[in-house]
Image (spheres, helix red, strand yellow):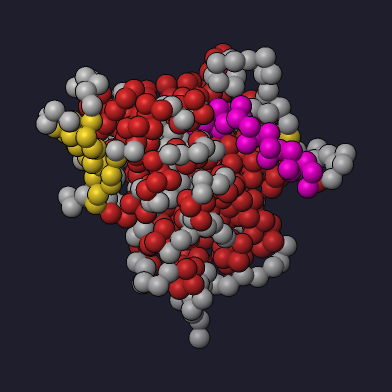
């Protein structure tokens, strides 16, 4: 008796048969824009200490004098090549390093930051075409986002970081596609990924940097799973729906599994991916923008208290523990703090990369406002469709300033435009490379379907300009 195809087998069959002609032009255009956005962020991250720290750690792991060989894959902005998995790991860390990368709201997952590094690394190694790279990225994105939607945000409630956990499967599918694997091998790769996927939220308690590792680790693990499958290793066929599959082992509540593959190739999730307009956890955006909107109204009068209303599921992530959130000790803590982001928005009128600098998150005037911020669940929140935020500033003279952002910038119904994405790319990329070089990268990404070799793009991305400053 033959068994009905498992969810991983269905996903593998779809991805293996996928052609560019079957992907709507609007989806392809959005995919290229998301890739451009991510690569600009990765270049900007290459100038931060965590980039060099991670590169040094990988060099130490590989041993004295170790060389990655002829198959080295370039690392974004660092002028170095690394072995296949190490390059994917570091590139994933760079894209996610500033928490500025895209988010799929309903899936509550950063999908590009694991799928793209995996696809780029394998495409460069295989000397695949730009079209093949784009197609693999689309396949991996559609799977990763749907895996998140099926959980309905419950992975966060159980203490797991969906980006690291789910990105492994999307990365495996993207790598399988680029390796030309059979549907059986691609399904096996997803089963193997079940044993490699990881990502924990404990970093939220002390602002530690492990979150940066999650997507890169997912990319490297997904590549590993695909190569293991290519060489005969078997993996569980019911990776998602099995007795000890992804959802049964990680969640206590049932998941909407039927949505993972039911409409593959008919409905597309890539257009629903939200581009971040600020370098912080997406849960903070609407409240930070609401506070920034009040900046022009506030005349500096003494404040009695500030109330921030946001979706209830976001409270444990960006509001607790409250005293720690009111006084972030590093950039990472500042990116996950409603009190700090609201205080910054109110005082300065925006939350940008400069808010991640020590002189910003230790500024006494900002911290004084942060100490007045309290968080409340928003009874009118439409989560996870939108990550809303409302800020109410009560002044000591009795006046009340109030602003609500019902739809976060970049969310459904309020997309970041192509022009805004390109402007963000240049703002980020030119922190690491000259504008003329950034333009060459932009052109290669946006013309990806005609790009003869993904190595061309990877080489452009890997160039280092040591004397360059934004």
Vertical comparison of 317 with 288: above or below: below
Predominant SS along the magenta part: helix
Relative image position of residue 401 (x, y in whole percent)? 16, 31
Relative image position of residue 208 (x, y in whole percent)? 55, 47
Q: In this view, does 290 lie to the left or right of 9?
A: left
Residue 264 in sight from this viewpoint: no
Q: Is residue 52 magenta?
A: yes
Residue under the image location 55 percent in, 16 percent down? 470
Residue 439 in sight from this viewpoint: yes
Q: Does the magenta stretch include residue 62?
A: no
Residue 125, located in which quarter of the rendered image?
top right
Which is more toward the observer, 337 or 267?
A: 337
Vertical comparison of 250 with 122: above or below: below
Residue under the image location 57 percent in, 31 percent down? 45
Q: How many marks?
A: 0
Vertical comparison of 234 with 161: above or below: below
Residue under the image location 59 percent in, 15 percent down? 469
Relative image position of residue 117 (x, y in whole percent)? 59, 42
Range covered by the magenta-colored residues: 35-61
Relative image position of residue 81 (x, y in whole percent)? 74, 35
Residue situated furthest left in the rendering = 398
Residue under the image location 29 percent in, 38 percent down? 372
Which is more toward the observer, 210 or 392?
A: 392
């Amino acid at each position: 008796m033959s068994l009905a195809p498992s969810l991983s087998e269905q996903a593998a069959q779809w991805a293996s048969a996928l052609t560019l002609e079957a992907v709507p032009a609007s989806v392809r255009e959005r995919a290229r824009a998301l890739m451009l956005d991510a690569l600009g962020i990765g270049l900007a991250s290459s100038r931060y200490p965590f980039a060099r720290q991670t590169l040094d750690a990988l060099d130490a792991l590989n041993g004295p004098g170790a060389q990655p060989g002829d198959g080295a894959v370039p690392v974004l902005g660092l002028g170095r090549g690394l072995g296949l998995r190490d390059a994917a790991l570091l590139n994933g860390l760079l894209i996610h390093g500033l928490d500025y990368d895209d988010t799929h709201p309903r899936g509550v997952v950063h999908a590009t930051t694991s799928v793209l590094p995996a696809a780029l690394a394998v495409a460069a190694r295989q000397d695949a075409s730009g079209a093949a790279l784009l197609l693999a990225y689309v396949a991996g994105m559609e799977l990763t986002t749907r895996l998140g939607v099926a959980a309905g945000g419950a992975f966060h409630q159980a203490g797991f970081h969906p980006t690291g956990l789910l990105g492994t499967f999307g990365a495996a599918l993207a790598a399988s596609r680029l390796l030309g694997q059979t549907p059986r091998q691609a399904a096996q790769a997803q089963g193997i990924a079940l044993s490699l996927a990881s990502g924990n939220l404990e970093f939220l308690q002390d602002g530690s940097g492990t979150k940066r590792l999650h997507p890169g680790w997912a990319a490297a693990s997904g590549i590993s799973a695909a190569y293991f499958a290519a060489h005969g290793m078997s993996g569980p066929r019911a990776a998602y729906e099995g007795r000890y599959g992804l959802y049964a082992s990680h969640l206590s509540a049932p998941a909407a599994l039927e949505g993972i593959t039911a409409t593959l190739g008919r409905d597309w999730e890539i257009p629903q991916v939200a581009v971040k307009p600020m370098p912080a956890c997406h849960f903070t955006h609407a409240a930070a923008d609401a506070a920034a909107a009040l900046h022009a109204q506030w005349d500096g009068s003494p404040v009695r208290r500030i109330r921030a209303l946001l979706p209830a599921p976001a409270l444990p992530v960006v509001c607790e523990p409250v005293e720690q959130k009111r006084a972030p000790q590093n950039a990472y803590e500042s990116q996950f703090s409603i009190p700090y982001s609201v205080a910054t928005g109110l005082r300065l009128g925006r939350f940008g990369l400069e808010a991640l600098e020590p002189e910003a998150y230790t500024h006494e005037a900002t911290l004084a406002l942060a100490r007045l911020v309290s968080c409340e669940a928003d009874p009118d929140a439409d989560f996870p469709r939108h990550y809303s935020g409302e800020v109410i500033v009560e002044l000591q003279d009795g006046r009340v300033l109030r602003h609500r952002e019902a739809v976060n910038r970049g969310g459904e119904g309020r997309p970041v435009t192509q022009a805004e994405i390109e402007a963000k790319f240049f703002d980020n990329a030119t922190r690491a490379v000259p504008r003329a070089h950034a333009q060459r990268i932009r052109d290669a990404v946006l013309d990806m379907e005609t790009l003869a070799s993904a190595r061309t793009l990877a080489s452009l991305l890997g160039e280092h300009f040591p004397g360059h400053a934004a």
